[in-house]
Amino acid sequence: MGGFEGVQFIAKLGDWVAVKKLKVEKATEPREIAEFLISLAMSANRKIEDFLAEEIDFEMIRRAIDDVSIEGPLKVLENATVRRAIKQGIKNRKELDKKVIKEFEELASVFALRYALKKAGCKLDYFDVEIPSLKLVKKLGKKVK
C-alpha cells in the first residue's frame, strides 16, 4: 500500500456497495478521524440489521415493545411479552442448533434493548449526535432504507 496511512473500507455484497476511505496526514484532525469512523459505524449498523433480518423477525419484536407498558427502557427484557417475541422471532428455529438459537436470541435481545432505549429518546450511538459533517450521510442512509 506504499505510503498510504489511513483507513479504507470496501464492501460489495449483493446490492450493498460501500466505499469509504480516509487518508490521514499530519494536518488531519483527530475529530476528522472520529467522524469518519462514526460514518463507517453508521453504515455497518444499518447492514447488520439487514443481514440479521434473514434470521430474526425484528418487526415482531418492535410490535411487542410498542404494545406493552414498560416501566423504563432498561426493563424491556424483563417483560414476558417481549421475551416471548424474542424467542418466537427466531426464524427457522426448529432447524437450528441450540448454540445458534442462543446467539440469535442474544442478538435479538440487544436489538430489543436498543429499540426500547431509542424509543425512549436515548442516544445510543455516536451517530445519534447531530454532527454537521454527517448530515448528508444520514440523509442518504434514510433514503436507502
Image: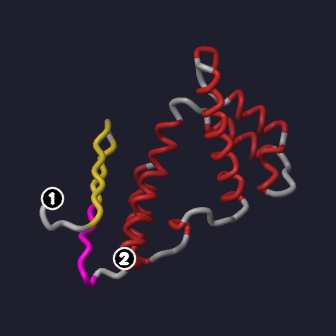
The local crowd at label 2, few if under 14, some if 14 to 19, many if 20 or more residues have their Cα within 10 Å, is: few
- The type of residue carrying mark 2 is Glu
Relative to 91, residue 2 above or below? below
Q: Is residue 127 left or right of residue 140?
A: right
Mark 2: which secondary structure? Answer: helix
| Front-lying residue, 21 or 136 | 21
Q: Residue at x 28, y 51 (%)?
A: 10
Mark 1: which secondary structure? Answer: loop
Relative to 4, residue 116 above or below? above
Horizontal and vertical percent position of residue 141 = 42, 56
Magenta region, residue range = 21-27
- The type of residue carrying mark 1 is Met
**What residue is pinned by disc 1?**
1
Horizontal and vertical percent position of residue 81 = 81, 36
Tag 1–tag 2 contact (CB < 8 Å): no
Q: Residue at x 77, y 36 (%)?
A: 83
**What residue is pinned by disc 2?**
32
Horizontal and vertical percent position of residue 11 = 30, 46
Q: Residue at x 69, y 65 (%)?
A: 121
| Front-lying residue, 78 or 3 | 3
Quadrant for residue 58, please give it.
top right
Residue furthest to the left in view is 2
Relative to 133, residue 68 above or below? above
Q: Nearer the viewer, mark 1 or mark 2?
A: 1
The local crowd at label 1, few if under 14, some if 14 to 19, many if 20 or more residues have their Cα within 10 Å, is: few
The question of residue 78 being in magenta is answered with: no
Q: Residue at x 52, y 74 (%)?
A: 130
